[in-house]
Image (cartoon, helix red, strand yellow):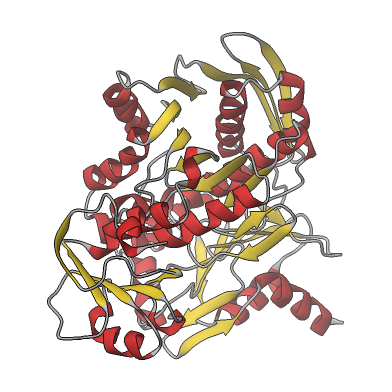
Amino acid sequence: MKLSDVVRGIDIIDRYGNMEVDIKDIVYDSRKVSAGCVFVCVTGFKVDGHQYLEDAIKKGAVAAIIEKDVDVKGIALVKVADTRKSMSILGSNFYNHPTDTLKLIGITGTNGKTTTTYLIKSIFDHAHKKTSTIGTISIRIGDVEVPSSRTTPESVDLQQLFREMLDKDMEYSVMEVSSHALDLGRVDNCSFKVGIFTNLTQDHLDYHKNFDNYREAKKKLFYKTTHTNIINIDDMHGRMIANEIKDLKAELITYGIDSNADIMAKNIIMDIKGIKFTLVTPKYSIDLEYKTPGRFSVYNCLAAAAVAYSEGIDKTIIKEGLIDIESVPGRSEVVNIDKPYSVIIDYAHSPDSLENILNAVRQYTKGRLITVFGCGGDRETQKRPIMGEVAGRLSDYCVVTSDNPRSEEPDSIIKQIEQGISNTKCDYICIENRRAAIEHALKIAKQDDVVLLAGKGHETYQELKTGTIHFDEREVIRELIREEV
């Protein structure tokens, strides 16, 4: 494709050199530069791509997109105001606008995105609709699944994935859309058929600064949809968004448990085996089941069912899709161990998600509820004492430990968590090393106790000041149990 075609639609400040040069790839990471590519110089939070332009030229880049003046020769240059946001147009052009054809479903919200993605795919699979997924855990296209490095990939990578999905005859793609992705323009030039809002609770405020900014970032998704917006109106922020987008061309479908919504759950029953409820829609009612207990599971099922309803999928298919899915990795995941106590792994890393999983587990815990948790480093500090209070209030015993401390001192994070937990009546201990913390919890667990490991979920690593190490809680649990023998 000619450079002039790749940059079509971009607001260009200036241009230099041959605009008709052939472009074979779009690259924003200098380590991935190949002959014939256009190199996008992104000014990141830590690294400035302009500093690597000369290296990119040596590796074969034939053009560059810049937002700063540079002193280089021998390649075509296109100057724009914001290279990062221009990438979405570049990618869409280069991969021939794949979301004009692919039916794209986007899910945004603080909690529930991953599970809802899995539920929608299960329903669509039962409806024999070829569906791919993009999310926190992995990217799945047909039978191929690869680990994901972030919730929502960079804009160029997204467009490449969408093209690959079409090439493999996918009809739908269901993707998690993070607030960062929306704010940084990663999903600009993506045409979503359906947009979903799950909820908004305290998280990522180190980036967004306040709830208003956080909500405004989430709301951007619903101006990118062509057919349907699906909003949880039991959530205060969901009600605000629904009111603000109600006059858009896309149909608005609301869902909830307590509010008078279009899609509702009635007659809810929960036990250790899962949930049962009656799905009530404008056209029909049907009794549904799902194997993961908790009120949050009802909301996830409602969101997935609302999508299927909007796409005209039969109610019996919805029922089959929900009951057939066993579990989502790291989401209320029960570890298979031969012990008189139970161990559950969950990704809960915000106050609301921690409270949700603790309330859910409490409902079927006959003995003590022992919670092992920490908070991530280099992230919002204000939620640490809040999570401490939540864990202390809802657990019988807590082990405060490290999560992903990153560049921070783990002991400093733990002390901030203690500010909240010390105000509760819960007994607790602080053990910085997460493996040792898990070992302690397993050693004190007795018959009918439940040990909840919160925060890591599906992750198989731990980010420390010294670097990233392998750390899979499933492996750790089994190793510790073997060592007991």
411 versus 444 height, above or below: below
Query: 204 and 369: which one is in front?
Result: 204
Query: 153 and 63: which one is in front?
Result: 63
Residue in the picture at 62% in, 80% down = 435
Identify the image quadrant of residue 298.
top right
Query: 312 and 69: which one is in front?
Result: 69
57 versus 182 height, above or below: below
- Residue 74 image point, x, y percent: 25, 85
Identify the image quadrant of residue 406.
bottom left
- Residue 363 image point, x, y percent: 65, 40
- Residue 158 image point, x, y percent: 47, 56
- Quadrant in which the N terminus appears: bottom left
- Regarding residue 47, the answer to whether it shows in the image is no
Identify the image quadrant of residue 282.
top right
- Regarding residue 455, the answer to whether it shows in the image is yes
Query: 75 and 86: which one is in front?
Result: 75
**52 displayed left or right of 421:** left
249 versus 93 height, above or below: above
Q: How many marks?
A: 0
- Residue 300 image point, x, y percent: 57, 36
- Quadrant in which the C terminus appears: bottom right
Residue in the picture at 56% in, 22% down = 310
**238 displayed left or right of 468:** left
